[in-house]
Image (cartoon, rainbow, N blue to C red):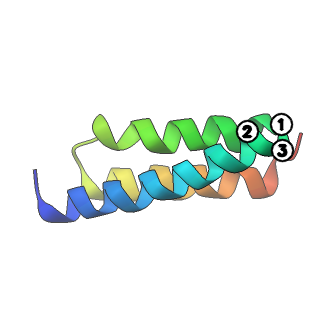
Amino acid sequence: MSASLLLWGVLFSSVGMGYFIYGKKQNATVPLVCGIALMVIPYFITSVMVMVLLCAALIAVPYFIRL
């Protein structure tokens, strides 16, 4: 495990925690699900580039999909 992978994982997990808390308080399902995904995905991905691209897409999803 490289240091960059660890740091990106911490960054995206903290953004995911923010989305999770926001989604839970506002009863919004899209930020809640994206937050959970952002907290879990860094555990399973071993490539930095794949993780950055996937997590960046997950961060953008609540801005485009509002339910």
Q: On the picture, is 20 further left or further right than 7?
A: right
Disc 2 marks a residue whose amino acid type is Lys
- Under circle 2, the secondary element is helix
Give the CA distance from mark 1 to mark 3. Answer: 4 Å
- Under circle 1, the secondary element is loop
Give the CA distance from mark 1 to mark 2. Answer: 5 Å
The foreground one among 23 and 57 is: 23
Q: Give the labeled residue for mark 1.
A: 27
Query: Would you say the residues marked 1 and 3 are in contact, meaning their CB atoms lie under 8 Å apart?
Result: yes
Q: On the picture, is 63 further left or further right than 37?
A: right
In which quadrant of the rendered view does residue 11 lie?
bottom left
x and y, in percent, of residue 3 in the image: 14, 63
x and y, in percent, of residue 63 in the image: 77, 58
Is residue 53 visible in the rendered image? The answer is: no
Q: Residue at x 65, y 46 (%)?
A: 21
Disc 3 marks a residue whose amino acid type is Gln
x and y, in percent, of residue 53 in the image: 45, 56
Disc 1 marks a residue whose amino acid type is Asn
The foreground one among 53 and 18 is: 18
Label 1 neighbourhood size at 10 Å, few (<14), some (14-19), many (20+)? few
